Image: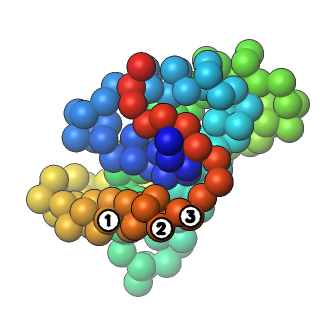
Amino acid sequence: MIPYAFGVKLAALASCKGLIDLEKWLSSNLNAYKDAFYEECIKFLKEVHLAAQVVTSNHFCSPNALRIIYLGTSSTFLKVLQSHSCLVSSPHLSVEMDKLHVTYMGTKSRFKSSGSADLSSSDYYSEDIEAEANLYFHQLFSGQGTSNFPLHDR
C-alpha cells in the first residue's frame, strides 16, 4: 500500500522503462478507486503541465528529465481518464478534466516548439530518475502520505 501521488509518479516512470502497461494499470486503479484515484491523476497532470509551462516561459530554466518523462506519459493519462469518465460521480472532476485537456493541447505544442522534447536519451535521465525514486521511497518508508492503494499491475 502506497500513497496515490507516489504510485502515479512511479507508474509513469515504470511505464517509460517498459516495466508496466500504463493504460492497463490506470484502468485497473480507476475501476477500483474511482473518484479518489481520478482526482489524483488530475493533480498529477496539472503539476506536470504547470512545470512544462514554467520551462517554456523561462528560457533560463532547463527542463528536468522527470518533467519530460511525465509530460510524455500525459497523453496516456488523458486518454485513459477520458475513457473512464463514466466512472466519475463528481461533476467537478469532469469539468477539471475538460479544462486539463485544453491546457494539455496548448502545453504540448509550446513544449515541443521550445526544443525540449528532443532530450530523450535514457542515459541523460538515469540520475534524475534515480534521485526521484529515492525521494519517493524515502517518503514512503518515513510514513508520509495518507491515501493508500496497491502499486502492482492487476
Give left or right: position of 23 versus 99: left
Which disc is residue 74 wearing?
none
Decide which of 103, 40 is in the foreground and name it.
Answer: 40
Which disc is residue 144 wearing?
3
Q: Nearer the viewer, mark 3 or mark 1?
A: 3
Decide which of 139, 130 is in the foreground and name it.
Answer: 139
Q: Where 24 falls versus 119 (above or below)?
A: above
Decide which of 54, 74 is in the foreground and name it.
Answer: 74
Q: Residue at x 65, y 54 (%)?
A: 146
Residue type marked 3: Gln
Give left or right: position of 128 versus 37: left
Mark 1 is surrounded, within 10 Å at the Cα level, by few (under 14), some (14 to 19) or many (20 or more) other residues, namely few
Q: Are marks 3 and 2 in contact (CB under 8 Å)?
A: yes
Residue type marked 1: Asn
Q: Is residue 49 visible?
A: no
Which disc is residue 142 wearing?
2
Mark 2 is surrounded, within 10 Å at the Cα level, by few (under 14), some (14 to 19) or many (20 or more) other residues, namely few
Element under label 1? helix
Which residue in the protein does label 1 denote? 134
Q: Residue at x 31, y 30 (%)?
A: 20
Q: Where 37 falls versus 72 (above or below)?
A: above
Element under label 2? loop
Residue type marked 2: Ser
| Residue occupying the far right of the picture | 91
Q: Quadrant of residue 94?
A: top right
Mark 2 and mark 1 lie on one chain; the one further toward the N terminus is 1
Q: Are marks 2 and 1 in contact (CB under 8 Å)?
A: no
Give left or right: position of 111 versus 100: left
Mark 3 and mark 1 lie on one chain; the one further toward the N terminus is 1
Q: Is residue 43 visible?
A: yes
Q: Residue at x 46, y 59 (%)?
A: 140
Where is residue 84 drawn, in percent x and y? Answer: 64, 19
